[in-house]
Image (cartoon, rainbow, N blue to C red):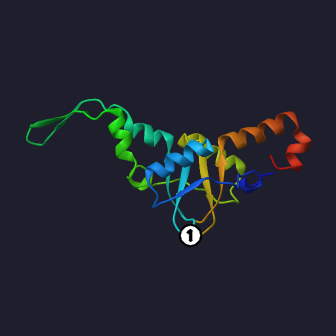
Amino acid sequence: MNRPISDIMDKDVYTCHYSQTLEEAVKILVDKKVGGLTVIDDNRHVIGFISDGDIMKAVAKQKTRSIAGWNYSSMVLYDNESFEEKVEDLKKRNVMELATKRVFCVTPVQPIGEVAEILSSKKIKKIPIVTADGALVGVARRSTIMRYIFNMLFNSDNARISNV
């Protein structure tokens, strides 16, 4: 049996609107205790994904690097901003400045095994589930699929007939 991901997907998805600031996105991440948010437009279409990793990367100390031009000249870039200055700079920036814009999505009818393969091969923890026109309806998480596997292994009768 190839159960569709809609049987176990999480329908309560934490999102942020593409017009929100990074300050607002961080507040949602902290308040909801999640590591990432699907970025949506006015029609709930998925247009991005912002994670705690994206934000950490923006405030982390950057290594000094040199950039060589085609005429053998080079420029050295230094990271002179303090951590606190970087955090302050994030406040009013738009969430889409740091969000991943190329987001892998699946449809509700895709089999659980296929979604598991995508999560594994792309090395991502969650994937938005969208309708044919791209509207967000849920999310599949590695942890949800792992609970489903656990139930199949240790409670096989219930896993076949109930949601995880």
- Nearest the viewer among 156 and 99 is 99
Comparing 131 with 111, the one in front is 131
Residue 12 lies in quadrant: bottom right
Residue 69 drawn at (x, y percent): 13, 41
At 34% from the left and 39% from the top, the residue drawn is 86
Q: In this view, does 50 lie to the left or right of 1?
A: left
Count of marks placed on residues: 1
Residue found at x 77% / y 54%: 7
Q: What element carries label 1?
A: loop
Tag 1 residue: 43
Give the residue type that dot 1 points to.
Answer: Asn
Q: Quadrant of residue 148?
A: top right
In this view, 16 is above or below 29: below
Position of residue 114 in the picture relative to residue 163 (left or right): left
Up the image or down, 145 lies above or below 104; here it is above
Q: Where's residue 130, x and y in %?
A: 62, 61
Which residue shows up at 50% across the image and 54% down it? 103
Which residue is pictured at 35% across the width and 33% down the height? Answer: 83
Residue sitting farthest toward the right: 157
Give the answer, above or below, for where 19 lies relative to 58.
Answer: below
86 sits to left or right of 67? right
Q: How crowded is mark 1: few (under 14 residues within 10 Å), some or many (20 or more)?
A: few
With 163 as the anchor, is 52 left or right in this view? Answer: left
Tell me residue 22's x, y (percent): 44, 50
Q: Is residue 36 visible?
A: no
Please indicate, yes or no, whether residue 34 appears anywhere in the rendered image: yes
